[in-house]
Image (spheres, coloured by chain):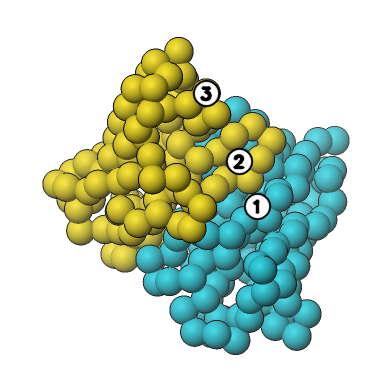
Chain colours: A yellow, B cyan
């Protein structure tokens, strides 16, 4: 089965740029989606189809996908961005949804 | 406006069957390229996909849980139901239903989640 690998944690100073990686075999051939998950709240889709943002998501959130790594980039990080972030794909070879293990973003 | 809401028991005993209902509004499961999935999160752990049902009744299941899961829909009631048999304490967690628009299955709308505890 397809596996997505994320770093457990990323720390960044407020105002700086955070990059959260999501590794998978030839992931560039898949559409990658990213979710923000805060304690006690439902996940929120922040990037879909590698690079697109849903309505209402700040432009500070962006995504890229190349080779074996997809990346969520959060510019000018704010305290309110502290959350767990999950990548997700639809694995067409198995017809299954796959989530990464999640990355905890801390604004130092 | 699209909304989803999960309902079901908060406590189940080990070996019992869990039945959760997702009631939605603002979408129609009669529309092509639309579906609803179930995702859970055990305390302190990652999101885990469970099952997905398409508008045309096609179903997909997590390979590790497939033998225990059944997903169905009732279009007339705007509901999707998930059953999970043989509940175990490790199944404790928050269960979410979520809507997906395209065949790339990005979950764009989520319910608030419902906490289910499996304990005797």
Query: Horizontally, is B92 left or right of B67 in the view?
Result: right
Q: Residues within 10 Å of mark 3 (few under 14, many from 20)?
A: few
Can residue B109 be seen at all in this image of the molecule? Answer: yes
Image quadrant occupied by the C terminus of chain A: top left
Whether residue A5 is situated above or below residue B110 in the rendered picture: above
Can residue A22 be seen at all in this image of the molecule? Answer: no
**Residue in the foreground of this view, choosing between B13 and B74:** B74
Query: Horizontally, is A4 left or right of B56 in the view?
Result: left
* Element type at mark 2: strand
Pointer 1 residue = B96
Pointer 3 residue = A79
Query: Horizontally, is B116 left or right of A39 in the view?
Result: right
The residue that appears at 80% across and 57% down in the rendered structure is: B7
* Element type at mark 1: strand
- Have a look at marks 2 and 1 and say if they share a chain: yes
**Residue in the foreground of this view, choosing between A47 and B113:** A47
The residue that appears at 31% across and 31% down in the rendered structure is: A19
- Among numbered discs 2 and 1, the one appearing first in the sequence: 2
């Amino acid at each position: 089965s397809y596996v997505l690998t994320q770093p457990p944690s990323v720390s960044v100073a407020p105002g700086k740029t955070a990059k959260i990686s999501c590794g998978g075999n030839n992931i560039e051939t898949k559409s990658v989606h990213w979710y923000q998950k805060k304690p006690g709240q439902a996940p929120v889709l922040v990037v879909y189809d590698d690079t697109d943002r849903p309505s209402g998501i700040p432009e500070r959130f962006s995504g890229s996908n190349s080779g074996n790594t997809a990346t969520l980039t959060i510019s000018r990080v704010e305290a309110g961005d502290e959350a767990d972030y999950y990548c997700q794909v639809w694995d067409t070879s198995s017809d299954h949804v796959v989530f990464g293990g999640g990355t905890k973003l801390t604004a130092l | 406006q699209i909304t989803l809401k999960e309902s079901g028991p908060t406590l189940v005993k080990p070996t019992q069957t869990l039945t959760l209902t997702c009631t939605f509004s603002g979408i129609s499961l009669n529309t092509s390229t639309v579906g609803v999935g179930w995702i859970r999160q055990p305390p302190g752990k990652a999101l885990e996909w469970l099952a997905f049902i398409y508008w045309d009744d096609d179903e997909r299941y997590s390979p590790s849980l497939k033998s225990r899961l059944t997903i169905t829909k009732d279009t007339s009631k705007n509901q999707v139901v998930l059953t999970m048999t043989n509940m175990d304490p490790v199944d404790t967690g928050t269960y979410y239903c979520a809507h997906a628009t395209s065949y790339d299955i990005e979950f764009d709308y989520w319910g608030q989640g419902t906490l289910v505890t499996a304990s005797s």
